[in-house]
Amino acid sequence: MTRLRIPSLLLLSALIAAPATMTVPVVWQTAAAADDQRDPNVRTKRTPSMRENVYKQITRVREAAEAERFGDALKILDSLLDSNLNSYEAAMSYNLMAYIQYSRDNYAGAIDAYNKVLAQEALPESLEKNTLYSLGQIQIASERYRDGVQTLDRWFALEDKPSASAYILLGQALFQLKEYDRALQPIETAVGMTRAEGGKVRENWLLLLRAIHYTKEDYGALRDVLKQLVAQFPSREYWTQLSAVYGELGDSKKQLSAMQSAYEQGLLRTSNDYRTLGQLLLANDVPYKAAAVLAEGFDKGVIEPDVTSLRMLADAWMLAKEYDKAEDALNRAAQRADDGELYLRLAQIHAEQAEWTEALAAARRAVERGNLKRPDQARMTEGLALYNMDRLEEAKAAFSRASRYEQSEAAARQWTSYISREQERLAALDRAREAAERAASQSSG
């Protein structure tokens, strides 16, 4: 039987990568909105008011930014920031500066502006929270993951009701820092929150969990995540990975079941998919189904008709007792092989079924192709076929050649002696018959 080869999880490493960092558009907060959202029960410091002339300038900046006239907006802002602003007016100005720089893909400029917002005294809590969250996003998008985590930690300390997306953002940054144990908690929190609220967990959240569990080699947890993925987002990738994980966990029945599920949904695409399913079916003693799956792969042109694949097909048909199909596959494999081993195997199969003409032809092809591990077996099979075809002198010659090899010397000599005795017996019978015919002829004459 073909030995089962469990797909190594190392082969999955290219597939189990963390999804790209999620970014959320940065927004600015207007002065009025900041005033409206201030909570006097949280803040003890009094926030300065925004003067009317500054508010008008801020409004001009916003209007220019909304029209994507960023150059004009920056000129107004630069002039405004050069004036004598109180801390609140400066904070709102830098908040707008951050938005404009972000919109121009100037992440470093946006980060600098947000830090200047946070440097102001007596910020409204809503502005501080929005600034921290936006800053954290941009730091993570800029691959400044450590800064992003520290910023988000400050934000979580202020936010009473963090969203699932916020937990995911923190988890992504921690994953990038390779702090996998810390990353698990916020990601699992986001998944739990979403499910508790009756929402649908996003695919990229589960992919983050998949990546973490794979990296930690926690195959039990990886299995559970993949089961969620195939339930919500069925695909070839997730089914085949789930099958491989069951293999790592030593559960061959479920390993086969996962691959069969992919097959039944028409998700198998590659030669390796079909070969893996065929191997699993053989390992679970379902040879006919294994052969049918492999044959389908050949018929679709998915499996290349190479020596290894054809031999696997031949083994499957042989175990299913479909000998004609097995012989056809093995013959195709033998034609492609660099040595005569498969022709020798084909010769032995024909011999087992007393197909002596075919056995002789295959044995001789095995010898001609060469590079045999046991050339004596080819000569023995050749001799056996010739003997059963009553070609005794040729059979003796074949056994004589086989006797040159130590492994078959004794058996070959026995066959040679036996055939010699048989030839003598047949010759004696011929002589006796001829004598009887002469006697009968003389008697009648």
Image (spheres, rainbow, N blue to C red):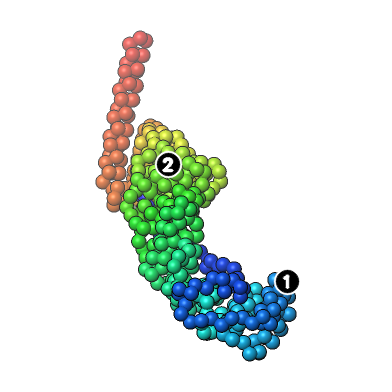
* Residue 185: % across, % down: 39, 65
Asked if 348 appears above or below 102 in the picture, the reply is above
Q: Earlier in the sequence, mark 1 or mark 2?
A: 1
**Residue at the spot x=36%, y=47% of the render?**
254
Q: Secondary structure at mark 1?
A: loop
* Residue 301: % across, % down: 56, 46
Asked if 353 appears above or below 48 in the picture, the reply is above
* Residue 188: mark: none
Q: CA distance from mark 1 to mark 2?
A: 65 Å
Asked whether the beta carbons under mark 1 and mark 2 sit within 8 Å of each other, the answer is no
Q: Which residue is the site of mark 2? A: 290
Q: Which residue is the site of mark 1? A: 67
**Residue at the spot x=48%, y=50% of the render?**
232
Q: How many marks?
A: 2
Q: Is residue 306 left or right of residue 78?
A: left
In what quadrant of the picture does the N terminus appear?
top left
Please state which amino acid type lies under the numbered disc 2.
Answer: Ala
Residue 412: quarter of image? top left
Q: Residues within 10 Å of mark 2 (few under 14, many from 20)?
A: many
Please state which amino acid type lies under the numbered disc 1.
Answer: Ala
Residue 215: quarter of image? bottom left
